[in-house]
Amino acid sequence: MPHAQNPNRPIRFGAPIGLALLVSMVFNAPISAGAQFSSGAQFSSGTQATTPESDPTSQPATFSSLPPSEPWPDDLIRDAQLPPAPSDLQELLTSGKVEFVFYDESQFRRKFQGETRFEMNYDSKSEFRWRQIRTRDGSRELVVRPQFRMVQVTATHTVLLPKRLITDSFYDHPLVRHELDHIRISTDARFAKTFTSWVSTEIRELHIPLNADSPSFNSLAEQEIRLKMSAHFRELVDLVRVRYAELDEQTKHGALPLPQDFFKSAESDGPASPL
């Protein structure tokens, strides 16, 4: 075991001591305390939607978990018979893992008629090498160099809408289209690419102070990698949250048409990209 080594014997940095494989390291961000965000929307035949109250500040310890704009009714309609989705929406609905739920406006009044809640998760696989070194001041450090084999970001969405929209023209309704625009944001593949880039470049080498109470080197390395990934994941969710807010601001929560250039930067990996 690494802790059985003589702590007084200096260890050359160039010689690897341990090799560990970290598999299926998963951090799930549940709705209650994870990477969750809600966006309210209202549409009423040319009437501008009411602007919601400003978002609460992010809570770093809970991955930017934000409360919904309004409570949801308990008796949601989940088994509505909707028409087949148009071909241009099928991929979006599948990749976004979208569920539509409905409520009765005569029984439950809301300021915002529609609302999208999303939950983001990441899954990663990596292997890492660690080396124990002694610093100039005589203290010990564990130097960890991860190599990520797989980083995957997924999102699920639940869209709340009034049940009067359950018609053959469901997917043509402006409110439905507005909520789908929110989903286009959080399913943008560039967010996953950004997270992968952050993880690969910013977690290239970790320095962890050691003391007599330090756990096993493998456990310590896994814990530090997880903490660093979680911090970057919070940043990623904040970027999605900003884009959600921009969409609502520019369309007044679905009351105004979507600007033609809103998703233009999302179609390019050039400098114009908001990420």
Image (cartoon, helix red, strand yellow):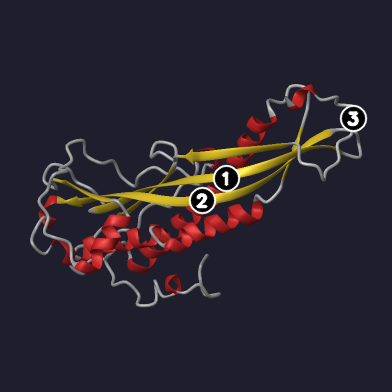
Asked if residue 253 can be seen in this view, the reply is: yes
The three-letter code of the residue at mark 1 reads Ser
Residue 247: % across, % down: 38, 64
- Which secondary structure lies at badge 2? strand
Mark 2 belongs to which amino acid?
A: Met
Quadrant housing residue 103: top left
Which residue is located at x 40 percent, y 50 percent? Answer: 154
Mark 1 residue element = strand
Nearest to the observer: residue 14 or residue 268: 14
The residue that label 2 is drawn on is 150
In this orientation, does residue 49 appear? no
Q: Earlier in the sequence, mark 1 or mark 2?
A: 1
Give x and y (percent) for residue 112.
26, 53
Residue lying at 30% horizontally and 44% vertically, measured from the top left: 70
What residue is pinned by disc 1?
126
Position in image of residue 91 (x %, y %): 28, 62
